Image (spheres, helix red, strand yellow):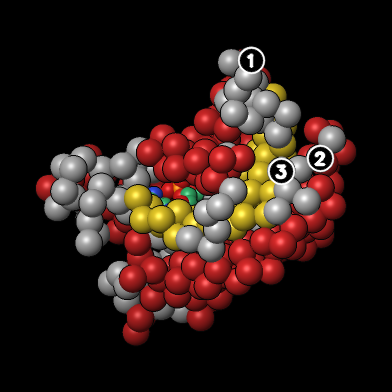
Amino acid sequence: MARFDGRVAIVSGAGQGIGAGIAERLASEGAAVGVLDLNAAAAKATAEAITLKGGKAMGIGADVTEEDAVEAAVNQVVSEFGGLDIVVNNAGITRDNMLFKMSVEDFDLVLAVHLRGTFLLTKAAQRHLVERKYGRIINLSSRSALGNRGQANYAAAKAGVIGFTATAALELGPFGITVNAVAPGYIATDMTAATARRVGMDPEEHKAAAAQSIPVRRVGLPEDIAAVVAFFASEEAGYVSGQTLHVNGGQR
Ligand code: NAP
């Protein structure tokens, strides 16, 4: 029997990148996956790729900052797959700039997607998890939570995710629900390619340069994060809660 047979998962921002990797990993081990993304076509493409490999998934277009859309997406997954067990808050954006040049709109938007989005999806999902007295919630933080030049908005949001995770773990623990966070370092996706272009570098060059400062001498891949999320999502991780695990190739 596979690790997630009979389990139902929702992964936000799973139209591409790390989220798609997580959705594929959970599905490959038996979970039925609700693939959420702002881009409905991308969500459907990830779900279709999973289905083609023999897995179970449905793609849903939803903006995690909109309460009604999040509620509707959760209800759709629950009614289609018959419940909910695993929630991965992965949707994210960057709007990098030095503090003195950062617009209020870019500050608010980044906080809304990461923090309000994590709050809304967790809130909509928790009542289904509490009902079943079982759940696994995994939130994406970042190494940038420790501070990163040009990312005052993103660093604040990702530090906020750590506090949110610790608090949700306290409140939901009595209902058999664990809440943990993963804080990735450099994971090669469209997000890091955009960062490379912002600093005037070719994405491949940027990856090679980054690898030099990472102890394991390579950048991460979505699969590296998916493997850790799958551990937190597993039944056997039931005594691990309120934690943030840094997954960054050994950087300090
Ligand atoms: P990505 O390739 O840009 O993917 C992020 C996904 O989230 C996109 O499909 C995006 O859709 C979706 N999204 C954005 N805003 C949304 C919203 N309001 N509602 C629903 N979906 C939305 O980024 P990634 O690198 O895979 O990052 C995934 C997560 O890991 C993020 O939380 C990120 O902050 C975190 N992380 C990444 C790294 C890294 O090195 N890559 C490091 C640390 C943490 P659209 O394409 O339509 O905008």
Q: Quadrant of residue 9?
A: top right
Q: Say which residue label 3 marks.
A: 85
- Mark 1 residue element: loop
Task: Report if residue 19 is visible in the image.
Answer: no
Name the residue beneath numbered marker 2: 83
- Which residue is at 56% across, 40% downward? 236
Secondary structure of the residue carrying numbered label 3: loop
Q: Count residues near mark 3 (Cα–Cα under 10 Å), then give few for <14, some for 14-19, many for 20+.
A: many
Q: Is residue 214 above or below residue 94?
A: above
> Percent from the top left, x then y, of residue 15?
57, 39
Alpha-carbon distance for marks 2 and 1? Answer: 20 Å
Q: Residue at x 58, y 32 (%)?
A: 26
Mark 1, residue position: 54
Whether tag 2 and tag 3 are in contact, CB under 8 A, the answer is yes
Whether disc 2's CB lies below 8 Å from ligand 1 is answered no
Residue drawn 56% across and 24% down? 28
- Pair 2/1: label in front: 2
> Which residue lies at the image location 84% right of the left edge and 35% below the top edge?
82
* Quarter of the C terminus within the rendering: bottom left
User: Which mark is first along the chain, 1 or 3?
Assistant: 1
